[in-house]
Image (cartoon, rainbow, N blue to C red):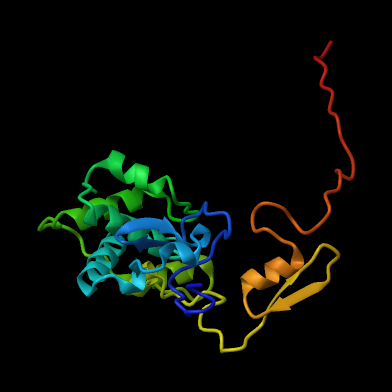
Amino acid sequence: MLRDRLGIETVLDGCSPQGQCGCCTVLVDEAPRVACVTPARRVAGRHVTTAAGLSAAEQQRWSDAFGACGATQCGFCTPGIVCRFVGHERRGADLSDRATVDKALAAHLCRCTGWQTIREAAAHASAPPSADAIERDPDAAARRASIETGGPQRSVPASVLGGFDFGADGAPPGTLTAITGPTGDWHTAENLTEARRQAGKVQGRRTTLEPTPPISLWRLHISEPT
């Protein structure tokens, strides 16, 4: 609903409909909820807030915290994490407490940054930075990443809140999505959810290809020297 019909691209689809990665986390009446497993009928008449709908002060504070701590790389998981942190914060949680932060992060997956810097970002956002804090230069970080990866990279505050223009973001109206089915045939639809349905593919749960045994099995026998 949020992406396919309303066009809110800061709500990212990582595993739908599993509800396991946390990338699509939003706030429903201030409480964090995973959007891909929350039917629209269950939020009728309720307030739904995405990362793009957070207050300007909250967006700035969390973008600054993640940037200062180097807590974002690709930025795919961070909008959901920020929404969860804000939801807990609005409900009185102490995000300077590591156990509280770890419990919140248990609902999320991050494959590139790692948890330590995200913990540090939560603490940074929860307390004023010290006077001797080192300010991070996003332009220098982008240049270093470009040298290390051999391709153009950028590090901007917008990436924390989902503004990094991933593959499906910013596609012109009417753009079709295509994925392969069990026999290698293509299924096209107006959105990824419908294309997966046509192909019979459940993201992350089962492949569209039939399972096959290994080509061969090898056994290595090691004997002690005589």
Q: Is residue 157 above or below residue 127?
A: below
Q: How far from the left and from the top, in percent, is residue 36?
A: 52, 61
In this orientation, does residue 219 appear? yes
* Residue 32 found in image quarter: bottom left
Question: Which residue is at the far right?
Answer: 216
Using residue 61 as the reference point, say whether residue 109 is left or right of it.
Answer: right
Question: Which residue is at the far left?
Answer: 131
Residue at 44 percent across and 74 percent down: it is 164
Using residue 5 as the reference point, say whether residue 106 is left or right of it.
Answer: left
In the picture, which quadrant includes the C terminus? top right
Residue at 29 percent across and 57 percent down: it is 87
Q: How many marks?
A: 0
In this orientation, does residue 156 appear? no
Q: Is residue 224 above or below residue 178?
A: above
127 or 39: nearer the eye? 39
Q: How far from the left and from the top, in percent, is residue 224?
A: 80, 14
88 or 77: nearer the eye? 88
Using residue 70 as the reference point, say whether residue 222 is left or right of it.
Answer: right
58 or 219: nearer the eye? 58
Residue at 28 percent across and 59 percent down: it is 86
Residue at 27 percent across and 64 percent down: it is 62
Using residue 111 as the reference point, say whether residue 140 is left or right of it.
Answer: left
Q: How far from the left and from the top, in percent, is residue 157?
A: 32, 72
